[in-house]
Amino acid sequence: MHSLKNDFIIIDLSQNYNLQLSRQQIISLADRKTGIGCDQLLILYVQSKEKFHFKIYNANGSEAKQCINGLRCIAKYIASNYHVAIPFSITNAAGEYLVTNVKNNEVTLSIPVLSRKITKKNIESECKTYNVDLVNFGNQHAIVKVTTLNSAKLKKITEKIKSSPSFSDNINVSIYKIYNDYSLESRTLENGSGETQACGSSACAIALAHSQTTNINKKSNLEIIQPGGSQLISFIEDNYLLVFGKTTNVFKGTINLNYSLESLLPS
């Protein structure tokens, strides 16, 4: 499945809780040339008809705490394959999240604001000083406002941030450009997966930072434009974001994990 071209492998362990994937198997499955290919692999645990939990693994095999586009795809998968009443909740390592609506391929999520505190730092890149906002939405984000938006600039700023002892090495980095008070465009380099076509938690981080520096009507939708498409974000009071986006089911199938692992071994 994918949400705004941020793509995922979903493994439903409702019938096989004992399955354990090694880091090498996850890397193999995520490989776009020798495996299935994905930005992140999601493992769904169905604990009961009302309890759903999922784990997130990046393309490099590392585990992540948060993935909002992945949460959106998991929500759509559950709504399509289990008899659930909407709204329903899903948990991951970062917390519990409410799925408020699933209509066709459109999913709306209620995302708690873990902290309104934004730490501000500076970096130097290409003889220019950039302001960096650090925001936590279950995973750490460094977001930087720029006037021009491209992959080369994102890569250079990410390298500066990741090489600095002032920042965590496993941080996600985004650059964004403001078109008007309610329309922003961004690109994100996700820790463990590289630049992705969309990132839900970075969109939330950008929306929160933007709301603190701009006099906006928080009940109106902010459009966060990313290479894979747009997410719409509004505020429910000050403690929750309402996040709307689309999902697409690409295909369903089976794979021999032993074979996919062997594809990585030297001949």
Image (cartoon, helix red, strand yellow):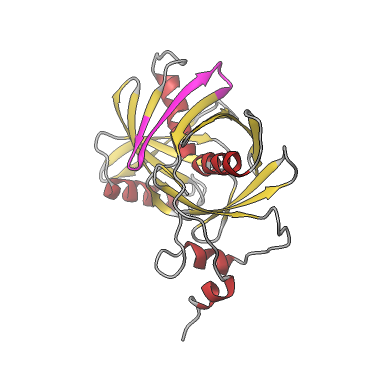
Query: Residue 63, relative to residue 178: is it above or below?
Result: below
Q: Residue furthest right?
A: 48
Relative depth, front residue between 12 and 154: 12
Q: Is 219 above or below relative to 91?
A: above
Please tell me whether residue 232 belongs to the stretch shown in magenta. yes
Residue 117, given in percent of the width and then of the height, sits at 54, 27
Q: Is residue 190 visible?
A: no
Label total for image: 0
Q: On the rendered structure, is 168 left or right of 223?
A: right
Q: Is residue 259 above or below residue 128?
A: below
User: Could you tell me residue 186's position as x and y percent?
Assistant: 35, 37
The residue located at (46%, 86%) in the rendering is 267
* Observer able to see residue 257: yes
The residue shown at (30%, 45%) is 125
Q: Which residues are magenta?
A: 224-240
Magenta run includes residue 229 = yes
Q: Main secondary structure of the magenta part?
A: strand
Q: Nearer the viewer, residue 26 or 116?
A: 26
Residue 75 horizontal/vertical position (percent): 57, 39
Q: Nearer the viewer, residue 157 or 199?
A: 199
Image-quadrant location for residue 25: bottom right
Question: Image height check: is 129 above or below 216?
Answer: below
Identify the residue at image location x=27%, y=40%. Answer: 149
Give residue 113's quadrant in the image.
top right
Percent position of residue 45, x then y: 68, 49
Residue visible at 50% across and 61% down in the picture: 60
36 lies left or right of 156: right
